[in-house]
């Protein structure tokens, strides 16, 4: 991921070199090497780069180099979420070194007048979300005719969130725009079409697909029913070491809240992150996570955008995402800047086609495996495993049990069915097909009665014999 190109070989301003030196950055990543020289020439650039590839510096360094500490707005960067806007602004502050530029964030969920007051004191660079930038422009706090530099970060996520009409509103009012930079992990046709509308003969910087889409991490999937996803998650979390941190992804705010509630019940330190939290709550949780006070975050996709924590070593897809690109954004939370990490997906039978589609689309090598064993120093599961026969049931809800008794001993299919009906004291509709092979008997039983059926076999003899049963997968 890193190249042999040194930042000090580019004749960058001393202040920026000082900022890079302060964070011990010596060598450019691939996207930085390909993008920065073009952007420094003033070219419009479309960069394809995944989260964690160093893309913020790829557009940040050229922008910082062109701006002067005048207190007049010179550059506008749009990001899809408040968290990502904060992350970009923080990295800009670090990279500028002693340049003295005023870099301000503008996003919803916080007091607009306080943000307006900061802008009135003078600002050189704004990093904001589309809605709040539009609002503050309408109110006269931002003059979009002032900036000459424009950057759109995570354009594919902007498209997913329905922001492209807002972006075009902003672009149309930037009458003096001289340079536009656009970055995205993926490029739906809508982004390509829009880019040609407002960019001037852009240069494309396209990392090859392996470098782009596949973080340097190990990826695993576990086949497990929803009833036992928490059990599997407990096995993953109990393996974590003291300095490790985890993000667990759920598809809904309700599921985030339930997962946090259940994890805390089982003595795991976890916090939830979703769109219903106010900005102060979100920032407090994020700061605790970045500071290492919280080890595990459970989040929705939108809420997790902008989380930039190097210590994340485990990503868990509790729910598989509905759209394919979100999978890449999720696993990109770990393996940051070449570090090691793992991504685990908990896959129910209904999820299996979606996982296959994700693997085929991106050419991912996701290893299907069992839930990890408990560490040697742990005696019992933090979360008990539940009986869950739904994963092996047919479309009518019936599960097949294989009995170690031959037909010669068991009797007719009617005799076997009658034994289960009497033992379970159930309606005959709960007992399905009975058939035999040379050594075994097979019976289909509704999922609601499977647990009772296995217990009945433990307690009672069948045809004078001790019989055991196993579920046929």
Image (cartoon, rainbow, N blue to C red):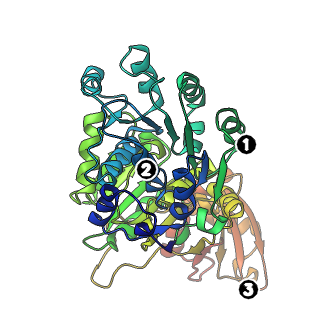
Which of pointers 2 and 1 lies earlier in the amino acid sequence? 2
Between 329 and 358, the one lying in front of the other is: 329
Point out which mark residue 189 bears. 1
Which of pointers 3 and 2 lies earlier in the amino acid sequence? 2
Point out which mark residue 439 bears. 3
Which quadrant would residue 94 be assigned to in this image? Answer: bottom left
* Residue 138 x/y as whole percent: 43, 14
Which quadrant would residue 313 be assigned to in this image? Answer: bottom left
Q: Give the Cα distance between marks 3 and 1.
A: 59 Å
* Residue 183 x/y as whole percent: 56, 48
Q: Is residue 245 in sight in this rendering? A: yes
Residues under numbered marks 3 and 1 in contact, where contact means CB atoms less than 8 Å apart: no
Circle 1 crowding by C-alpha within 10 Å: few under 14, some 14–19, many from 20: few
Seen in the picture, residue 289 relative to 469 is either above or below; the reply is: above
Side (left or right) of 112 relative to 230:
left
Q: Is residue 425 in sight in this rendering? A: no
Picture residue at 58% right of the left edge, 49% below the top: 184
Point out which mark residue 393 bears. none
**Secondary element at image label 2:** helix
Between 422 and 300, the one lying in front of the other is: 300
In the rendered image, which residue does mark 2 sit on?
Answer: 60
């Amino acid at each position: 991921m890193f190249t042999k190109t040194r930042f000090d070989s580019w004749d960058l301003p001393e202040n920026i070199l000082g900022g890079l030196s302060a964070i011990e950055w010596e060598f450019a990543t691939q996207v930085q090497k390909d993008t920065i020289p073009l952007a420094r020439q003033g070219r419009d650039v479309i960069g394809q780069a995944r989260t964690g590839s160093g893309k913020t510096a790829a557009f940040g360094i050229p922008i910082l180099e062109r701006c002067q500490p005048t207190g007049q707005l010179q550059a506008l960067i749009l990001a899809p979420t408040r968290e990502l806007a904060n992350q970009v602004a923080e990295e800009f502050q670090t990279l500028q070194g002693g340049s003295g530029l005023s870099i301000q964030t503008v996003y919803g969920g916080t007091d607009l007048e306080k943000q307006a007051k900061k802008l009135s004191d003078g600002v050189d660079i704004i990093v904001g979300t589309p809605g709040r930038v539009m609002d503050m422009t309408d109110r006269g706090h931002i003059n979009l005719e002032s900036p000459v530099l424009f950057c759109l970060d995570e354009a594919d996520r902007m498209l997913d969130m329905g922001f492209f009409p807002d972006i075009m509103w902003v672009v149309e009012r930037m009458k003096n725009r001289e340079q536009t930079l656009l970055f995205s992990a993926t490029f739906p046709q809508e982004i390509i079409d829009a880019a040609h509308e407002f960019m001037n003969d852009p240069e494309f910087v396209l990392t090859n697909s392996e470098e782009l889409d596949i973080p340097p991490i190990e990826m695993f999937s576990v086949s497990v029913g929803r009833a036992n996803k928490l059990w599997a998650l407990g096995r993953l979390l109990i393996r974590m070491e003291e300095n490790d941190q985890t993000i667990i992804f759920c598809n809904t705010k309700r599921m985030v809240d339930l997962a946090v509630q259940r994890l805390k019940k089982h003595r795991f330190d976890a916090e939830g992150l979703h769109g219903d939290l106010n900005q102060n709550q979100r920032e407090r949780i994020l700061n605790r996570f970045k500071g290492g006070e919280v080890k595990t975050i459970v989040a929705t996709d939108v809420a997790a955008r902008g989380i930039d924590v190097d210590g994340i070593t485990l990503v868990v897809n509790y729910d598989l995402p509905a759209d394919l690109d979100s999978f890449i954004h999720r696993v990109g939370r770990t393996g940051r800047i070449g570090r090691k990490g793992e991504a685990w997906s908990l896959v129910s039978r209904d999820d299996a086609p979606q996982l296959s589609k994700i693997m085929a689309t991106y050419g991912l090598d996701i290893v299907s495996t069992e839930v990890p064993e408990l560490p040697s120093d742990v005696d019992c599961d933090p979360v008990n495993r539940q009986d869950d026969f739904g994963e092996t049931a047919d479309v009518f809800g019936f599960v097949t049990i294989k009995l170690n008794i031959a037909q010669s001993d068991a009797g007719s299919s009617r005799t076997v069915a009658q034994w289960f009906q009497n033992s379970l004291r159930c309606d005959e509709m709960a007992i399905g097909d009975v058939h035999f092979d040379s050594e075994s008997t097979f019976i289909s039983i509704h999922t609601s009665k499977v647990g009772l059926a296995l217990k009945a076999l433990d307690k009672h003899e069948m045809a004078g014999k001790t019989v055991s049963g196993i579920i046929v997968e």
